[in-house]
Amino acid sequence: RNARENASSRVSKSAFSDGLFYSYRSRKENSNNTRRKRLVRAEREGNYSPYHTQNEEKLMDLLTVQSVKTVLHYLQETNGEMHFYLNNYIYENPFGKTYKNSAGQPTRESGEEWLINLASSGLTTVTNPMRGSVPTIEDSQPRTREISPRDVCERILATRKELSKDFLLLLEKVEVKNGSVLRNALEKTFTTMDEQQQEDDDE
C-alpha cells in the first residue's frame, strides 16, 4: 500500500511538474510569437525601433511645445488679447500634467490631448489691461475681445505643420552630426595621448 501511495505521489508530482513546465513553455512560446509578430509588422512598416511609439510621442510633444512658443512670440506683436488668453491658458493647463486614467493609473497628458482640450474649450471674453490689438470706438473703453480657443489651436496646428519642415531638415543633418562627434572624439583621444606622452617625457 505504501509503495502504491509513493508511486502515486511520484506520478502526481511528475504530472504537476510537467503541467507547470508545459504552462511555462506555452507562455514563453506565446510571448516569443507575439514579439516575432511585432518585429515582422515593424519591419513591414519600416520601423526598426522598439521605442517607435515613444519616439513618436516625444517628437510630437516637442514639436507642439515649439509651435506654441512660436505662436506666442508672434501673437505678442499682432494680437494682444489672444496672446493674453493663450499665456493664461498655459499657466492654468501646463504641458505634461499627470492625471488618472479610467483604470486609476497615473497617465501623462500628451501634446495631442492638450491641443484637443484647448480646441474644445468654449468662447472666452478677454480684457487685456496691457494693450489692445483691435481699436475700440472709444479709447476710454476697456480693450475687450472674444477669443475662440479653436482659432488659437488652429494657429498652433498651422505653425506645427510649418515647423515640421524645419525638423525634417534638421534630422537630415544627423549623419553629419554623428560624423562630427566621432571626429572630435578621435582628435580628443590623440590630444590626451600627446599630453600624457609630454608628461612622461618631463618626468
Image (spheres, rainbow, N blue to C red):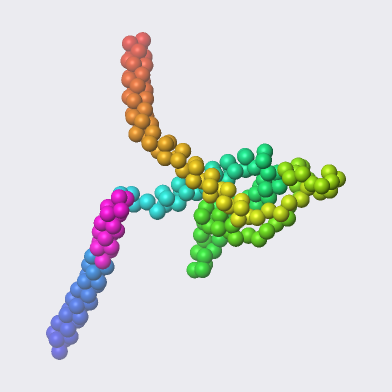
Q: Position of residue 68 (x, y in %)?
A: 57, 45
Give the camera-side residue of 60 and 103: 60
Q: Is residue 12 visible?
A: yes
- Image: magenta residue range: 30-47
Which residue appears at 36% of the width and 19% of the height?
Answer: 191
Q: Which of the 4 quarters of the picture holds residue 27?
A: bottom left
Q: Position of residue 136 (x, y in %)?
A: 79, 46
Which quarter of the rendering shows the N terminus? bottom left
Q: Position of residue 86 (x, y in %)?
A: 65, 49
The correct choice, above or below, for 82 with respect to 31 in the image is above
Which residue appears at 63% of the width and 60% of the height?
Answer: 121
Q: Is residue 31 magenta?
A: yes
Left or right? Give the position of 200 relative to 112: left
Q: Which residue occupies the extreme front position in the image? A: 137
Q: Is residue 158 magenta?
A: no
Left or right? Give the position of 63 relative to 133: left
